């Protein structure tokens, strides 16, 4: 359970607002959320986990070769099921991406940045990055839309937390 809590704390910004399933080879964790008696530590964990939309599913050790790939080789004798693997997919809205690209041509600051790609500024697939931060032009309501998405998808936290979640991945002047 400690591993699950640490993983949730590490990837909280990616997991909040999304349903996900936790696969484990520890069968008793399936019933963690319906336990009647909890220690103080377990109660804190339960309270922390309540902000996530997740479920815990037990996977038999024979089928869970991902847990310890070197020692738990998949059982290939008359076994039609495939081993469990992690899949994480991120899709972007093509219209939003196109608005960003269009904004690069209308925003004077972005035009100057594009004409003089300085050190640390790169262009990838038509998008401008400073280090690893995507440049958001002053075009339409892109900045406001991003801020609203962060606020709504992270659980309606304060503006400081919404801003904090954006500042590592995005940049716009006077951010």
Image: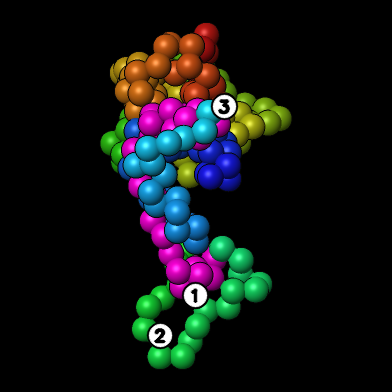
Residue 145's tag is none
Quickly name the residue at label 2.
Answer: 79
Q: Residue beneath label 3, please?
A: 168
First-in-chain label (2 vs 1): 1
Q: Is residue 36 above or below residue 162?
A: below
Going by the picture, which residue comes out furthest to the top?
174
Position of 127 compared to 2: left or right?
left
Q: Are marks 3 and 2 in contact (CB under 8 Å)?
A: no
Task: Give the residue at x 50% y 58%.
Answer: 26
Q: Disc 1 designates what residue? A: 62
> Please, is residue 142 above or below residue 41 in the view?
above
Label 1: how many residues lie within 10 Å, few (<14), some (14-19) or many (20+)?
few
Whole-percent x and y of residue 11? 52, 37
Residue in the picture at 57% in, 26% down: 168
Marks 2 and 1, how far apart at CA: 10 Å
**In the figure, is residue 14 to the left or right of 3?**
left
Q: Judge whether 69 appears above or below 90 on screen.
A: below
The spot of residue 125 in percent (x, y) is 48, 44
Q: Magenta stretch: give its range.
A: 41-66
Compare residues 58 and 35 and report the one nearer the observer. 35
Mark sitting earlier along the chain (3/2):
2
Q: Is residue 48 magenta?
A: yes
**Mark 3: secondary structure:** loop
Q: CA distance from mark 1 to mark 3?
A: 40 Å
Q: Determine contact: label 2, label 1, CB under 8 Å.
A: yes
Where is residue 7? Give x, y as percent: 55, 42
């Amino acid at each position: 359970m400690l591993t699950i809590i640490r993983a949730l704390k590490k990837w909280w910004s990616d997991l909040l607002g999304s349903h996900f399933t936790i696969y484990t080879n520890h069968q008793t964790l399936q019933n963690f959320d319906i336990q009647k008696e909890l220690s103080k530590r377990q109660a804190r964990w339960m309270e922390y986990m309540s902000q996530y939309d997740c479920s815990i599913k037990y996977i038999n050790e024979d089928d869970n070769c991902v847990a310890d790939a070197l020692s738990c080789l998949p059982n290939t004798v008359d076994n039609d099921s495939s081993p469990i693997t992690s899949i994480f997919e991120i899709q972007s809205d093509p219209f939003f991406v196109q608005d960003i690209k269009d904004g690069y041509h209308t925003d004077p600051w972005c035009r100057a940045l594009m004409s003089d790609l300085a050190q640390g500024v790169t262009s990838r697939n038509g998008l401008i990055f400073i280090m690893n931060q995507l440049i958001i032009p002053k075009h339409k309501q892109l900045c406001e839309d991003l801020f609203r998405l962060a606020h709504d998808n992270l659980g309606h936290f304060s503006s400081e937390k919404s801003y904090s979640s954006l500042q590592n991945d995005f940049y716009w002047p006077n951010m």
